[in-house]
Image: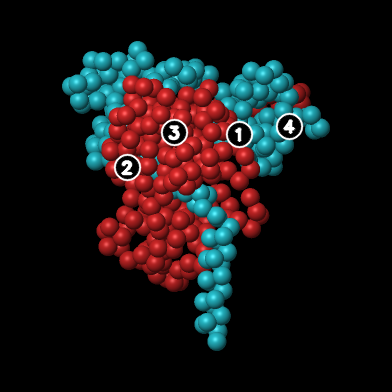
Chain colours: A cyan, B red
Amino acid sequence: MSNRAISKSVIKRLPVYLRILDNLIRRDVEIISSKELSNESGFTAEQIRKDLAYFGAFGTRGTGYNTSYLREKIIKIIGLDKKTDVIVLGAGHLGTALTRYNAEKNPYVNIVAVFDRDPAVIGQDISDVPVLPVEEAPALIRDYQIKVAIVTVPADEAQGVVDMITAAGVRAILNFAPAKIHVPEGVHVFNADLTIELQSLIYYSSAEDERFYRLKQEKLDKEKAQKS
Amino acid sequence: MSNRAISKSVIKRLPVYLRILDNLIRRDVEIISSKELSNESGFTAEQIRKDLAYFGAFGTRGTGYNTSYLREKIIKIIGLDKKTDVIVLGAGHLGTALTRYNAEKNPYVNIVAVFDRDPAVIGQDISDVPVLPVEEAPALIRDYQIKVAIVTVPADEAQGVVDMITAAGVRAILNFAPAKIHVPEGVHVFNADLTIELQSLIYYSSAEDERFYRLKQEKLDKEKAQKS
């Protein structure tokens, strides 16, 4: 990736802003300050001002950003101004849930097909999206010039499937398979590792401060013991 | 959260380190440098050294970190040294996929029960985890002192379910419902918004540099027009 390209962390924040703006516009809110955007998103107001200025969106001091203008700007930057065709690999529970949700609720994407190798599901459809045999994926990717795929196959099948779809032209993969996958240069992968989120969360489930101070105390005790 | 507590971003990186270390240990790798950890994780070596030093783990200059020692340290910090009891709300496709995966593949958690309100699924089980009526959740949370829940119910049911489980004692929620939920102070929520990941990815599916330069050019043209 060229060093002049937009950083990955900025690109991850833009859809968060977009969702907040969508909600604000639905509630007829016309102006939002970077401070309010900060409250809603959890990013600092400074970070937000920096991100938005980078794209040429400047708030008015003392008032804020025009929500509709900002939304249009972000939609254009991400490339959501027309529906993006997406395919799903794997029609298991996760593939089915993601297909259903995106087909019914996500206005920015068009789920073209789901691929599986199980004859029991091939030929069915999920929210009107057809489930096709996985061998047919490359031809469809080429015909429809599909660039985005969601991979939900088992870990041991992930690399094979990814090799196949990237060879056919897929350039961006949202990977739910708990496996490290390798892709050709120029292909982007986001690993949506649901286990990792859960483990971070477990940290908060116990008395975090208590544990932190216990560990800190252990460290201090150890240092003391080494000194004496 | 106290300002002396560990920051959320650090807590999100620890499970990533843990997964890398698990893989390295499986391959009998005993030492890893911060540079190698950087290649595997995508975080900068500087960030990694900072994170780990914060917990009292210091690499040996020129060699690196002992993988087993570091793994034990991280497991202890996150609180994964004993299995954490977790419940799942919603036995739809996503709830089923998450229950199955965690019950079968995640060594750090114990999925105690799945709750749903659909009589057609109540009484069944998912990877040996029972599906129970949602009204029974509070009693089970109290009896088993459950602190962690995964919420996969529809958006319009999410707040009601969250109010119920937090009143019963849940302190940490992984929320997959595409809704902003409100929780009492001291309860942590991670929003696993699968749409947001997908939208970030769409950015990369088109010629990103091309789009960036087009937008930049438009901005320059506009500035020029204003000047003249």
User: Label 2: which residue?
Assistant: B103
**Pointers 1 and 3 within a single chain:** yes
Q: Chain of mark 3?
A: B
* Residue at the limit of the structure toward the left, as seen here: A119
Left/right of residue B148 with respect to residue B181 in the rendered view: left
Q: Chain of mark 2?
A: B
Q: Position of residue A88 (x, y in %)?
A: 34, 25
Type of the residue with mark 3: Glu
Type of the residue with mark 2: Ala
Which of label 4 and label 3 is nearer to you? 3
Which of label 1 and label 3 is nearer to you? 3
Q: Position of residue A124 (x, y in %)?
A: 26, 15
Q: Are marks 2 and 4 in contact (CB under 8 Å)?
A: no
User: Label 3: which residue?
Assistant: B136
Any part of residue A6 in sight: no
* Residue at the limit of the structure toward the top, as seen here: A128
Residue density around tag 2, few if under 14, some if 14–19, many if 20 or more, within 10 Å:
some
> Which numbered disc, 1 or 3, marks the residue that appears first in the sequence?
3
Q: Nearer the viewer, residue B223 or B117?
A: B117
Secondary structure of the residue carrying tag 1 is: loop
Residue density around tag 3, few if under 14, some if 14–19, many if 20 or more, within 10 Å:
few
Q: Are marks 2 and 3 in contact (CB under 8 Å)?
A: no
Secondary structure of the residue carrying tag 4 is: loop
